[in-house]
Amino acid sequence: MTNSVTVEELVQTLDIEFAYGEEFKERKITSSEVARPGLILTGYHEFYVYDRIQLIGKTEINYINSKTSEERTEIFKVLCREETPAIVIARQIPVPKELIPIAQACRIPILTARSKTSRVLANLTNYLEGKLAERLSKHGVFVEVFGLGVLLVGASGVGKSETALELIQRGHRLIADDRVELYMIDELTLIGEAPEILRHFLEIRGLGIIDVMSLYGVAATRLSKKLELIIELILDDGTHEYDRLGSQRETVQIFEVNVPKIKLPVKTGRNLAVIIESAAMNYRAQVMGFDATESFNSKLDALIAKNQQEDM
């Protein structure tokens, strides 16, 4: 879990620039929430969340410009606190001259963005939520199959990485091998990515570590992906029972998200890559409203009813 992001990292990642206070670029941002201090500017200070980035847009600036210079100074004295990580002004609106010395005294960098305020707010929130969200490290191989984020899990040596390599050769993409970092960006969405040191690398027993990007090109990898399906690979020793019809729905809860899970037996002669492709396409069909199991059961019920009528 990343506890903080520096203002410098924010500027390097998003379309935001330093207007003043670049010497304070190491200021740390610890909250993914971004505040628009409209009520604070009008004098209502009771619930001022001063430890967040303060975003000022066209509406706030128009209100500020309607005040005298002395009134603006008093407003900015309330807005600027030692704990405030940064002030961002959207639409490249000129920075009010009264704000500059007050922000400097509190060591607050002032940033400007070209986009409209709502776009800046969305970009800031998305970036900070991704960087500051609680993270869970899970053992497995994360691949994109037909645009679907599929996490392959199972015992060590079951063939996860080898299966991923065959999927890559068939045109699919690697996100992470061995260890996947998962974090939640909203109540329904989990994102998975590789730790920076493991990006693009795949370990194949007997061969060692290969660089997938170098061998297969940039189209064979991606940095992150939404987790939509978990497939557990299990060595088939005859002791496990498997769902023959696919009517049993199993899920795994990660944080607050329930992720569908499928168990696949591994034994000689099974082409796991093809089966995983079929599992991904079947899951996508279910999401779109077509369930092969329900279709089969409906046909079976109709056949039984027909045979009963013929026997009467």
Image: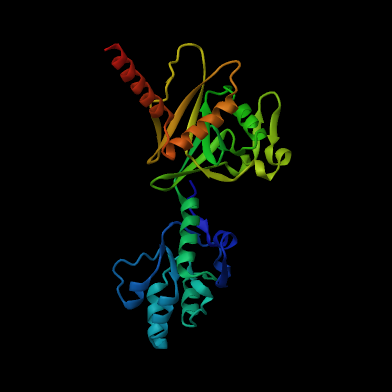
Residue 312 x/y as whole percent: 26, 12
Residue 168 x/y as whole percent: 64, 35
Task: Name the side, left or right, on which 142 lies relative to 31.
Answer: right
Residue that extends furthest to the left in the rendered view of this protein: 312
Residue plotted at (50% across, 51% down): 131
Colour convention of the picture? rainbow
Residue 107 visible in the picture: no
Instruction: Please tell me which residue lies in front, 84 or 199.
Output: 199
Q: Is residue 97 above or below residue 10?
A: below
Instruction: Please tell me which residue lies in front, 312 or 102.
Output: 312
Task: Name the side, left or right, on which 147 lies relative to 208.
Answer: left
Residue plotted at (52% across, 39% down): 149
Q: Is residue 231 above or below residue 99?
A: above
Residue plotted at (49% across, 54% down): 4
Residue plotted at (57% across, 69% down): 17
Task: Name the side, left or right, on which 91 lies relative to 66.
Answer: right
Instruction: Please tell me which residue lies in front, 103 or 87.
Output: 87
Task: Name the side, left or right, on which 42 lies relative to 33.
Answer: left
Give the total number of marks visible in the rendering.
Answer: 0
Residue 8 visible in the picture: yes
Residue 310 x/y as whole percent: 31, 14
Residue 104 x/y as whole percent: 50, 74
